[in-house]
Image: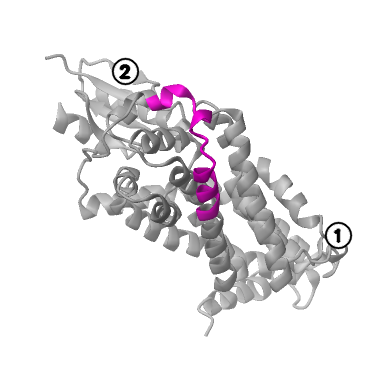
Amino acid sequence: MNIFYPIQLLADWLTYSVFCIVSDTTLACAVNFFIYDTIKIFILLIVIIFAVSIIRSFLPPEKIRFILSHKNKYTGNVIASLLGIITPFCSCSAIPLFLGFVQAGVPLGTTFSFLVASPMINEVALVLLLGLFGWKIALIYIVSGLVIAILSGTVIGKMKVENLVESFVYQNSINANADQPNMTWSDRFAYAKKYTWDIIKKVWPFIIIGIALGAWIHGYVPTDFLARYAGADKWFAVPLAVLIGIPLYSNAAGIIPLVSALTEKGVAMGTTLAFMMAVTALSLPEFMILKRVMKIKLILIFAGIAGVGIVFTGYLFNWVL
Amino acid sequence: MNKTIEVIGSGCPTCKKLYKETLKAVSDLGLEIKVEYINDVQKIISMGIMQSPVLAVNGKPVLVGFTPDMEKIKKAIQDNL
């Protein structure tokens, strides 16, 4: 049974009885789609972000670092990528995370695995994928995101690029044991409530606009319209989607509902996944900030390897899905 | 010993917000302590922390990584002064 069925009933009732729109018209279709998606996405956002925040309150970055500084190189990449899933990542914490990891002796490759996984597999992207494409696509996104993070970190670790990190980084070294203020359950709930609210406050306009545009496309654009330009048989669609995704970081929340509508109109699924990964994992503002701790060459290597991984994933899923 | 209240951040919007809220908390509490805003990530790292912002009272981190509501900030300051 579809657990979102009550929302569909509510959307039907609002569209046909409250707004009195004649059913089976394009307008009814678009309005119904907008109401249904908006309610569903916001319920999912609240539930999932709250749950992730509670888990996260048990695993602050300092604890993650403690775990990572005691792993060998290979399991380190895997664990770093997994832990990256639940860690929030905004460009303002990129520097403290990078310095904190490297100075506590976490290998550079492991640090990069974390830097790739943390923004790419974030809860807002997951909610939107789950709500708009279903759990299979969301799961594919998580798994391929993890694989890209593990491989990128492993490759960078093998490249011996320590000399491309700004020299001051290695001049300080610190102990991985942090003195953390203790949290009670009521602190955790307060933190989760606050964090969920902050995120919703930040992303809601983008999501509403994205869903509205998506609903409009859903109702008014012919189904195969985009297949001609971005179907699975167009080789350039994936790299192009990745390039477009790099500067779009801050609007990830609004882009996904839009992309969901585009997928319906013929953009291949792999291209869509690659686009989303590029939007989240490769962010121009983050690169600018990382320049303070590493040479541009290392940022290019990092973006290049993750970018190639994303393009490859896009082709793979265009081919298998 | 001199009492200190510091907000240490990387210059991000959340950090500035915590600084503003802390200023207000200190004046609401009627404390005569200057709140310092420190934009030095290395200082956060040497405290063993990897999130910004940090509210430190007498050099000890009491709030880490996010800006809670006003009551929490006041309590964190009072409990640790």
Residue A174 painted magenta: no
- Residue A206 visible, this orientation: no
In the image, B79 versus B64, the foreground residue is B64
Classified by dominant secondary structure, the portion drawn in magenta counts as helix
- Amino acid, disc 2: Glu
**Structural distance between the alpha carbons of marks 2 and 1:** 56 Å
Q: Specify the subunit that label 1 lies on.
A: A
Task: Establish if A101 lies above or below A203.
Answer: above
In the image, A257 versus A120, the foreground residue is A120
Foreground mark, 2 or 1, reads: 1
The image quarter containing residue A313 is bottom right
Which residue bears the numbered disc 2? B36
Residue at 38% over, 60% down: A51
The image quarter containing residue A170 is top left
| Residue A312: x %, y % from top left | 68, 58
The circle on residue A229 is: 1
Mark 1: few/some/many CA within 10 Å (<14, 14-19, 20+): some
Residue at 22% over, 16% down: B33
Task: Establish if B11 lies above or below A256.
Answer: above
Asked if residue B46 lies left or right of residue A157, the reply is: left
- The range drawn in magenta is A150-170
- Amino acid, disc 1: Tyr
- Residue A207 visible, this orientation: yes
